[in-house]
Image (cartoon, rainbow, N blue to C red):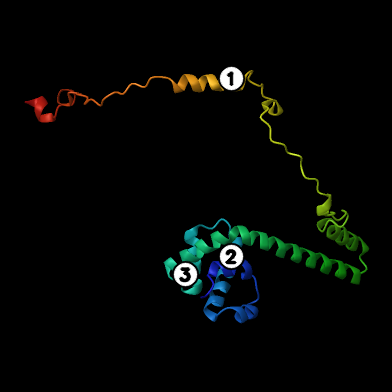
Amino acid sequence: MLPKIIDICHTDLFTAEDELLTKYNPQQVQHIVRLRDMYNWFLSFPDATDRQFVDEFKSRYQLGRSKAFADLALIKTLLPSISSASRDFHRFRYNEMILETYHMAKARKDTKTMEKAASSYAKFNRVDLEDEQAVPYEDIVIQPFVPTMDPTVLGMHAVPNLDRKIQELLKEMGTSDIEDIEFEEVDLEEKELFPLPQETNG
């Protein structure tokens, strides 16, 4: 059974095409590549309407209208998870660009630009902060929760003699006489209240 295209896109939307061909059939790969292209166009024109999006990809890929709308729905479904993945990608690209800027400045002996690039790299990657230390499981203290009937622990006032009042109410409600009432038809005199048009005119 072939995996659903949406499941594939969750993990492999940005995977290189040659690698995709080793994992999926050519038709699926073609669809993934098209969705990737559509996603990038979506980011480039965030103010575009659904109609513009569909028209663009109908002409770009010779898609039918229903197929283009189906792909648009897939893209919108994937957007939250794609956004997370794309942030990781953009972080990588940012580091790549900053390092390239640093090396170019170093080749020109431009120490001012080198310092700015290094500072930007350090700030973006938060290298000035200490690594977070994981708490060992054996040091995690179990909270001493204890069940209680005392409402004062929640800041509420206790009802005096609560058990006695509960028993009194149970006794009172349990011994009340219940009167059976038979069902009776209600005569609303509907013909007089809501006469038909011919009856009012006649």
| Residue under the image location 93 percent in, 63 percent down | 111
Please report whichever mark, 3 or 1, sits nearer to the chain's N-terminal start: 3
Identify residue for label 2.
39
Question: What residue would you read off at disc 3?
Answer: 58
The answer to which of 149 and 119 lies nearer the viewer is 149
> Mark 2 or mark 1: which comes first in sequence?
2
Task: Find numbered disc 3 in the image and state the secondary structure of the residue it sits on.
Answer: helix
Q: Residues within 10 Å of mark 1 (few under 14, many from 20)?
A: few
Q: Secondary structure at mark 1?
A: helix
Q: Amino acid at mark 2?
A: Tyr
Q: Is residue 41 above or below residue 165?
A: below
Left or right of residue 22, residue 69 in this image: left
Residue 135 visible somewhere in the drawing: no
Foreground label between 2 and 1: 1
Kindly identify the residue that appears in the image at 63 percent across and 20 percent down: 159
Query: In the image, residue 164 lies at what x, y percent?
Result: 59, 19
Q: Which amino acid type is marked by label 1?
A: Arg
Q: Quadrant of the C terminus?
A: top left
Question: 111 or 37, which lies in front?
Answer: 37
Which numbered marker is on residue 109? none
Q: Amino acid at mark 3?
A: Lys
User: Where is mark 1, residue-wise?
Assistant: 164
| Crowdedness near tag 2: few (<14), some (14–19) or many (≥20) residues, C-alpha within 10 Å | many
Say whether disc 3 or disc 2 marks the residue closer to the N-terminus: 2
Foreground disc of the pair 3, 2: 2
**Residue 189 falls left or right of residue 119:** left
